[in-house]
Amino acid sequence: MELGLDGTVAVVTGGASTIGRAIAMALAAEGAVVAIFDRDGALADKTTAQIHSGGGVATFHQVDLTDLDSTEAAVGIVEDELGPIRTLVNSVGWNGKAAAFLDLPPERWAELHTRNIATTANATRAVLRRMVERREGSIVSIASDAGFGAPGASAYGATKAGVMSFMRSIASEYGPFGVRANTVSMGLVIPETGDLGEHGGWRYDTGLNEEAVETIKATTPLRLLAEANDIASAVAFLASHQARRLTGQILSVSGGYCMPR
C-alpha cells in the first residue's frame, strides 16, 4: 500500500526511544523526513543513526516540550530547514507506578498533566497554526487504553482520556481547514532491553510484575501484547493519504483488550 508520505516532513515528539522510536523509524521507512523532538540526546543520536543507515532522513532537536516557547522555536527551525510539517505525532508520555486514587499525592496529578497533556497541547499549538494556513495536515496522538478506565491508573488514565478528547476537539474545529486529528490508544507495550533512556518513563517502577503481565495477556482476546512496531504501523496509516477520510477516530492497538465505541 502506498502511503504517500515520501518527502513529507513529520515531527515525532518523544521519538528517541520505545514507541516514539518505532514511529520515527516507520515514518522514515515510508520516505518521510523525520524531525525527532526529545530530551535524550544519546538515544536520539542512536535512533537517527539507525534511520540514516536504512537510507532514511532524520534530524534531532533537543526540546523540552513542557515549554511552549522552546517548542515553537524548534518547530520554526524544522520548517526553515526541512520544509512544511505535514505530520505531527505526539508520542511523549509518562505513567509511573500504578496506585489507587487515594494513594496518589496531588503533585503526581500535576506531573502527569504536565507530561501527558501540556506536551501534547504545546506541540499541537506550535504546528497547528501552520497547518491551518496551508489547509493541510495530520496530527496523531498516542493515548492508552487506561483512558477508558483502569484500576491503579486514575491519574494516568485521566490524562490519556484528555488526549483523546483533545484530538476529537481539534478534529471538529480544524477539519474545515484540512487538518485531521486522530488517536492511537495503546495497550501494554513492554520496551525492548536497551531501548530506555535517561528520561524514559519505564525507568520508573510501573508496578507491573510477570504475574500482572500474564493476567493482561490472558484477558486479551488475541492473547498477545502489542509491540512498538504495531503502534507505529497504525500511526503511519493514520498519518497517510490512505486515511484521508479519517479524523476524530480512536484506534485501539491492544489485541482487543479494549474495544472503544
Image: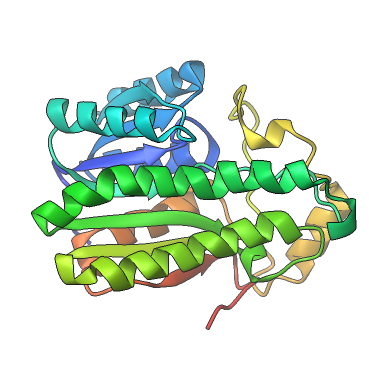
Colour scheme shown = rainbow
On screen, residue 226 above or below 67 = below
Quarter holding the N terminus is bottom left
Q: Is residue 147 above or below residue 24?
A: below
Which residue is at the far bottom? 261
30 vs 207, left or right, is left
Task: Give residue 156's quadrant in the image.
Answer: bottom right
Using the image as rendered, state which of residue 125 and residue 208 is in the foreground.
Answer: 125
In the rendered image, residue 83, in percent from the top left (x then y), is placed at: 12, 35
| Residue 209 in picture, x, y percent from top left | 85, 47
Residue drawn at (89%, 57%), measured in percent from left and top? Answer: 102
Tell me: 213 left or right of 15: right
Q: Residue at x 43, y 55 (%)?
A: 141
Q: Position of residue 87 (x, y in %)?
A: 26, 49
Q: In this image, 8 relative to 168: left or right?
A: left
Quarter of the rendering containing residue 100: bottom right
